[in-house]
Image: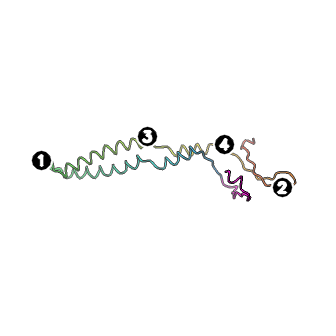
Amino acid sequence: MDEIRTGSAPNYIRWDPERTDLTITESELEKIRSASYNHWKDLFLVCLPLSITCLLNAFSDTVNPFILTLPLFLNYLIGGIAFFLSFAFGIAWARTHVNINHLISSIREKPKYKVELGQTGGSEATPSVVLRHENGQ
């Protein structure tokens, strides 16, 4: 903002009066960024299909009488570990999940200000922007 005020050239804002602009704080911006990328979700989505395929393969290869072979053991081991990890990652994802709709509604509930274009008095008429609260304050 300082580079705008100290510049020698005039500054212009191209603005559409029919558009509604919303302002957000740094913390709200950080919440939006963190809500869009969650490591727990990624780990959950990697482990779940791995566990399903390994366990299905292990169940389909199991014969009666039960004979434990190395491929069967590895399928049960990897499938079981991946299943429990996907369960843990799913719980972590659910706990750290930010409800983005709640955040957006809280941004929209901020007080509204009406922007009015006018001119300041004096020998030279200078265009100005006036912000007024919707209640007229």
Q: CA distance from mark 2 to mark 4?
A: 31 Å
**Looking at the picture, how far across and down is residue 123, in whole percent?**
87, 54
| Of the two numbered discs 2 and 4 in the rendering, the one whose residue sits closer to the viewer | 2
Residue type beneath disc 2: Ala
Q: Residue 65's mark?
A: 1
Locate the C terminus by quadrant: top right
Q: CA distance from mark 3 to mark 4?
A: 31 Å
| Of the two numbered discs 3 and 1 in the rendering, the one whose residue sits closer to the viewer | 3
Q: CA distance from mark 3 to mark 1?
A: 43 Å
The mark that comes first in sequence, 3 or 4, is: 3
Would you name the residue on which mark 2 appears? 125
**Is 16 within the magenta?**
yes
The reply to whether dot 3 and dot 4 touch (C-beta < 8 Å) is: no
Q: CA distance from mark 3 to mark 2?
A: 57 Å
Element type at mark 2:
loop
Q: Which residue is at a point 85% across and 55% down the rendered structure image?
A: 124
Instruction: Write the start and end of the magenta stretch as one range.
Output: 1-19
Would you name the residue on which mark 4 appears? 111
Majority secondary structure of magenta residues: loop
The mark that comes first in sequence, 1 or 4, is: 1
The mark that comes first in sequence, 3 or 2, is: 3
Q: CA distance from mark 1 to mark 2?
A: 96 Å
The mark that comes first in sequence, 2 or 4, is: 4
Element type at mark 4:
loop
Label 4, residues with CA under 10 Å away: few <14, some 14-19, many ≥20? few
Residue type beneath disc 4: Pro
Q: Which residue is at a point 50% across and 44% down the rendered structure image?
A: 99
Q: Which residue is at a point 66% across and 54% down the rendered structure image?
A: 19
Q: Residue 95's mark?
A: 3
The mark that comes first in sequence, 3 or 1, is: 1
The reply to whether dot 2 and dot 4 touch (C-beta < 8 Å) is: no
Residue type beneath disc 1: Pro
